[in-house]
Amino acid sequence: MPLPTSTSELRALDAAHHLHPFSDMKSLNAEGARVIVRAEGVWLEDSYGSRILDGMSGLWCVNVGYGRTEIVEAVRAQMMELPYYNTFFKTTHKPAIELAAKLAELTPPQFNKVFFTGSGSESNDTVIRMVRRYFDIKQQPTKKIIISRRNAYHGSTVGAASLGGMAPMHAQGGLPIPDIVHIAQPYWWGEARQGETPDEFGLRTARALESTIDALGEDRIAAFIAEPVQGAGGVIVPPPTYWPEIARICRERDILFISDEVICGFGRTGKWFGCETFDTHPDILVMAKGITSGYMPLGAVMVADRVAETLLEGGDFNHGYTYSGHPAACAAAIANLDIMINEKIVERVADDVGPYLAARWRALAEHPLVGEAPMIGMVGALELTPDKIGRTKFPDVGKVGTLARDFSFQNGLVMRAVRDRLIIAPPLTISHGEIDELVARARKTLDDTYGTLKRQGWVA
Ligand code: PXG
């Protein structure tokens, strides 16, 4: 059967057979999914021929933008030469070797070894097994608990969703698995006490890690995992006091620190990795998304020398995936990283487009609907509120966010809504002119949303 060409027929076929992630399929099928047909640079094109500015880099991943023939050609050449081989039984191949060496070069000096996976979720499942294995080898088998944070996102597999702190995910399928504990997130706007400054709140929230270690017993804690900036949780940029205090606690205690760099890695925050932006010193880095700019599925777990040495002493690690180190995915990553290096994309985010975007984005905080407008590197948010001063939330959380998100699409800009927070993470290659366009469309979206809320009496 040839694929139909009209949008309505494509939607009907999609509705008949395709179950989408994180979707209410009954209402999506009734509404019909938007069909994206092609993309170039920062622009998407849908089946009606509309051009939409992709403010989310796909799903936080297309860091070098769409249409990069260098990556396409590298994948094609690799597929012609060796489309697949495994790395299990005393075999390896050139793309995995080259990428592993390259990652060792690009990551902070303590990292020289990598375990490949197919995604961020698989990377985090790997991490759970790896840190517990590490302490078993060190004859500290009681150290099993991994401390994470509420509202964190670490993926969707059973292990990764357990590490994550998303209550609606835990509510489905009997999660979390045992020995995962969640502490508070550093979300000043949403969770600070009245009168508590960001600095005070940052310290208090960081010290929850220390008090949790003490309450449960250091001999039972294996690790702490965190995203440098919580992404799917709403782009939660911690107060300046937060990371230094966490780093101190991790230094003083016998626990491993895992930095989940799936979103923050590969330039998003203005350095290669979020842990460098915040000057933390992790033992494990979790990667996916930007490692290939989303052109091929690939994940990785980088292991610091002190952890790797122990793991190497322990014999077999009974863990791995068919697609660990997939040759074509590694080839995509190598070509992607070459683009990042040759075009000095990380430097560009730090010195040029990052500050340019931040200045314009932060000006949106003056809009009557916006409580805060954080931006770090090329990832930012707009907290929508009926009361900027009192930091109150809208009554039916998520409704205003969804309304604004839909306006944004109509205005030709993809923004994501998390609760009543709008989010952007555009390709790092975006131009100044495109940033102006992005901010103008975001402003129009705020005006449209505000107008509707006024008419409905939701705001004064
Ligand atoms: N860690 C972090 C920090 C992530 O953001 C994962 C792990 C899992 O990666 P995979 O490749 O298994 O999806 C992610 C993924 C959203 C959204 O709606 C965010 C992600 C995935 C899907 C949706 O913002 N992040």
Image (cartoon, rainbow, N blue to C red):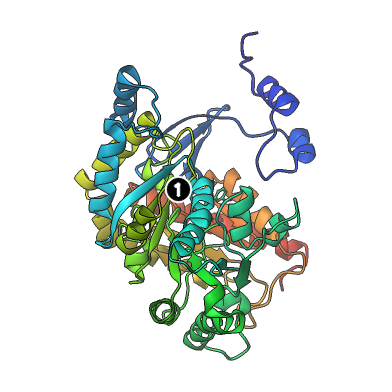
Given residues 148 and 15, the one toward you in this image is 148
Q: Residue at x 60, y 30 (%)?
A: 35
Q: In this view, does 83 lie to the left or right of 453?
A: left
State the residue at coordinates (43%, 46%): 316
Give the residue pinned by disc 1.
317
- CA neighbours of label 1 inside 10 A, class few (<14), some (14 to 19), many (20+): few
Q: In this view, does 146 lie above or below 431?
A: below
Residues 143 and 437: in front is 143
Quadrant that contains the C terminus: bottom right
Compared to residue 69, the image places residue 387 above or below, namely: below
Which amino acid type is marked by label 1? Phe
Q: Where residue 396 sits in the image (x, y, percent)? A: 77, 64
Identify the residue at horizontal 48%, vertical 41% (top origin): 320
The image quadrant of residue 358 is bottom left
Looking at the rendered structure, the secondary structure element under dot 1 is loop
In the image, farthest residue toward the bottom: 195
Between 264 and 443, the one nearer to me in the picture: 264
Q: In x, y percent, where is residue 401?
A: 65, 58
Q: Is the N terminus in the top left, top right, bottom left or bottom right quadrant? A: top right
Q: Is residue 293 above or below residue 302?
A: above
